[in-house]
Amino acid sequence: MSKGHRSQIKRERNEKTKDKRPKASLKFARLSNRKADFVLDSIRGKDVSLALALVTYSPRFGSYLISKILKSAIANAKNNNNMNEEDLYVAECYAGQAPTFKRMHPRAQGRAYSILKRNCHITIILDDKANKKTAMNINKSKSSKKEDGSQKKEAK
């Protein structure tokens, strides 16, 4: 009946669904995720060389950290996935919230105000431009199917 131990079955199932795209991440960055999102929004969906240029010359605080992550993702794509740098684009990039440092600021009459020093986890996922075109075609076909369904409802 069974085809192996439960852990082996799970491992095989997870390998099939695992995301094979090259990525790089920075955990516990001393930067709030709001500030990181400003820079990440500017490079999302862009070509890797253009994204690297944007991040390098961006005056934002987190741009230096994000440039290091982007370079690491490019190196991962070259070395681990044997991808060409000219064919890469930034498929996904996001900053999630990490644990917050809590500090106290002494105030008058024995009070204390709390200071929240926010951190974030930054992740950049790259992909091949050929995959971008196929993904866009799939999305277009899904949207056209939805429009056909709405037209049928209106006809009734």
Image: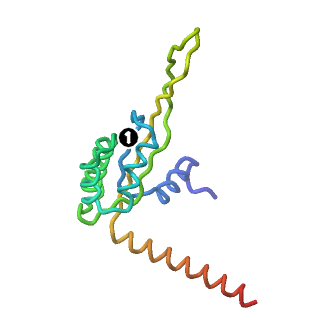
Q: Name the residue at 56% across, 48% down.
A: 5
Q: Is residue 106 above or below residue 51?
A: above
Q: Name the residue at 61% across, 56% down.
A: 2
**Residue furthest top in the image:** 110
Look at the image and name its color scheme.
rainbow
**Residue furthest bottom in the image:** 155
Q: Looking at the picture, which amino acid does disc 1 mark?
A: Leu
Point out the image quarter for the N terminus: bottom right
Indicate left or right for 132 with 8 as reference: left
The location of residue 57, given as percent across then percent down, is: 24, 49
Indicate left or right for 63 with 102 as reference: left
> Which one is nearer the viewer's eye here, 137 or 84?
137
Q: How many marks?
A: 1
The location of residue 122, given as percent across then percent down, is: 41, 44
Q: Disc 1 marks which residue?
A: 26
Identify the image quadrant of residue 27.
Answer: top left
Point out the image quarter for the C terminus: bottom right
> Which one is nearer the viewer's eye here, 3 or 105?
105
Identify the image quadrant of residue 60.
Answer: top left
The location of residue 34, given as percent across then percent down, is: 46, 43
Indicate left or right for 13 with 55 as reference: right
The location of residue 21, given as percent across then percent down, is: 38, 58
**Residue furthest front in the image:** 108
Q: Name the residue at 48% across, 43% down.
A: 96
Q: Is residue 41 above or below residue 104?
A: below
Q: Is residue 145 above or below residue 7?
A: below
Mark 1 burial class by Cα count in 10 Å: few <14, some 14-19, many 20+:
some
